[in-house]
Amino acid sequence: MKMGASVQIRAISEYKLQEIENAVSRWFDGIKSNRFRRSKRVLIKPNMLGAYLPSRAITTHPVVVEAVIRYFLSKNKEVWLGDSPGGSVSVSKVWELCGFQELADKYPIKLVNLSTHPYRTVESNGHSLKISNALYECGIVINVAKYKTHSLMAFTGALKNLYGLVPGMVKSEYHRLHPDTHGFADLLLALYLAARKKISYNIIDGITGMDGAGPSAGKVQNFGLLMGSQSVSALDYVASKMMGFKIKDVPYLQPALIKDGILPSQITVPRSFYNYRLDADIALVKLRKEGLKYLPPILSKAFQKIYYYFPLISDRCIKCGVCVRSCPVEAIAWQENGYPLVMRDECIKCMCCHELCPIQAIDIYKSFVARRFMR
Ligand code: SF4
Ligand code: SF4
């Protein structure tokens, strides 16, 4: 039976702890679940993509996480705070720069490195997936995502944030195995289906977010929104729509809503957010490649000669090597001049390098036709 779901939204313009705490406390108090009341241990899963300051709007802001921590500590729960950052970045550096180490110094919580924490293998929707045991060791799981565009998936919110439950470099391996957008979306959907029953509540931190070339090289935007829902798919549907995406622009969204039995028309939002639209730049990431699938192979091949894009390392590069170490197919090699180079024939266009470069030195080069077609 198809049903609805509710999405809570608050207009919050600054990271003021009291205001955010009021919102999340109200949302959590409304959860009617025995497991939520009785479970002793909570996993808070923010977006810890890499070692970035909160002002960059790449990772979940620590004040939002702090509000969640305070709620559960006030209920005498044991709080774990964990994620598996992307690529080969040092997790302690991520905790430090993102402001999570400071939270662990201030509150009696445990920082859990999901890159090295034990995992289990779960069969889901035709995929065999490695998922952190932390998901199963905590009776309450709070998914606290960041509101951004995404170069491969168009949008990143609650569902994409679950990818951090996959440990360490296994994430890169999955990118290698599922190089195209739709293959990777299918993997994300399988991960979601495996994890969804364990997720108690989802928050998207859109007080500041990112548009343009997200999830790390875009423009910081003061969207002024904090959103929450018990439903991952309903929350992503509402959040992506407010950014200007259509349901098919985000490849895992419609299948996730169908699997959840949720009808978009029956998702409820606060009255003041009916038909709410942000002025977000999504042209760079909007996927219009669907049509290519329906071209005859000969035309498709010809079209790909004029329609192409690839990551291009700019002269802003500081030669840190993160991209070289993170590329799942070893398509980035050091050149004699000390700079890395993307070998286009090897590249599977997963965009991990673009996402993980700490100083956003990797641009996305698009052919003239790709520029027209992807807008
Ligand atoms: S492109 Fe970015 S990630 Fe790669 S070496 Fe240069 S600065 Fe580091
Ligand atoms: S070069 Fe970048 S986009 Fe290409 S496969 Fe490697 S990480 Fe992915």
Image (spheres, grey):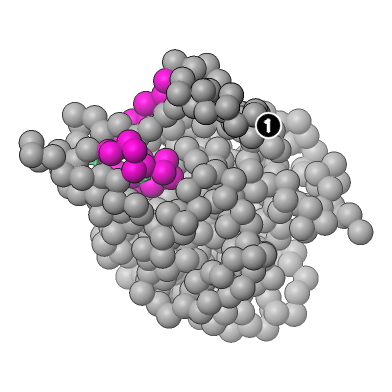
Q: Is residue 100 left or right of residue 250?
A: left
The foreground one among 364 and 275 is 364
Q: Amino acid at mark 1?
A: Tyr
Residue that protrudes farthest toward the front in the picture: 298
Q: Residue at 32% across / 70% down in the picture?
A: 105
Ligand 2 within 8 Å, label 1 CB? no
Task: Point out the stretch of residues depicted in magenta.
Answer: 342-367
Q: Is residue 156 left or right of residue 117?
A: right
Q: Which residue is mark 1?
A: 294
Work out whether residue 165 can be spotted: yes
Where residue 364 sits: x, y (%)?
A: 38, 30
Q: Is residue 291 left or right of residue 327?
A: right
Q: Residue at 34% across / 52% down in the picture?
A: 329
Work out whether residue 268 can be spotted: no
- Judge whether residue 112 is colored magenta: no
The foreground one among 23 and 38 is 38
Q: Is residue 150 left or right of residue 267?
A: left
Q: Residue at 44% across / 32% down in the picture?
A: 213
Quarter assignment of residue 42: bottom right
Tell me the quadrant of the picture where the C terminus can be found: top right
Where residue 336 sits: x, y (%)?
A: 8, 39
The foreground one among 352 and 267 is 352
